[in-house]
Amino acid sequence: MTNNHKLININIIKHPIITDKSTQLLEENQYSFAVDNQTNKKDIKKTIEYAFNVKIKHVNTCHRHPKKKRVGKFTGYKKKYKKAIITLENNYTINLFSDN
């Protein structure tokens, strides 16, 4: 018997995105994550459901282009990344901040 399931790679989730906009989205049960550029929505959904033990309703993604940054007379660019906005089912939440 062969196993048709793909292994879940947790490394596709880089980090949660914490901004003013993303904290407002928390009230609507939506969470923002920076993910690997090559990852598709199905893999993002499987990985987050496995990692946080939640049920996902929607996954929206967008590519964030590099911003120009300047330090003194030197200019450069920040890295580009893919942003995933996850909408959870009503009775699920993700605890991003540990309670110590």
Image (cartoon, grey):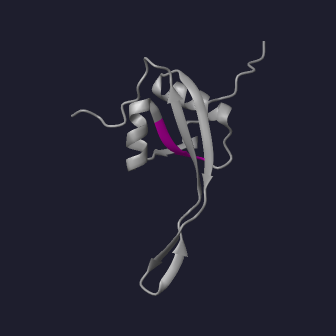
Pick out the residue farthest to the bottom. 73
Q: Is residue 96 above or below residue 38?
A: above
Give the residue at the far right of this rendering. 1
Locate residue 27, reporting x and y percent: 38, 32
- Residue at the (45%, 47%) spot, across then down: 17
- In the rendered view, tell whether residue 53 sits above or below residue 74: above
Q: Is residue 15 visible?
A: yes
Q: Residue furthest top?
A: 1
Q: Percent from the top left, x then y, of residue 90?
A: 46, 19
What is the chief secondary structure element of the magenta stretch?
strand
Residue 16 vs residue 61, the one in the foreground: 61
Residue 18 in view in this figure: no
Q: Where does the image place residue 33, in percent across and percent down from the top left?
A: 50, 43
Q: Residue 99 occupies which quadrant of the picture? A: top left
Q: Which residue sits furthest left?
A: 100
Residue found at x 41% / y 84%: 72
Task: Count the labels in the image.
Answer: 0
Q: Which residues are magenta?
A: 31-36
Q: Is residue 61 left or right of residue 90?
A: right
Comparing 51 with 75, the one in front is: 75
Could you tell me which quadrant the C terminus lies in?
A: top left
Report if residue 73 lies within the magenta region: no
**Residue at horizontal 40 percent and vertical 35 percent from the top:** 26
Please identify the quarter of the rendering in which residue 49 is found.
top right
| Residue nearer the viewer, 48 or 57 | 57
Residue visible at 66% across and 42% down? Answer: 39
Q: Position of residue 14 (x, y in %)?
A: 51, 46
Q: Is residue 98 left or right of residue 34?
A: left
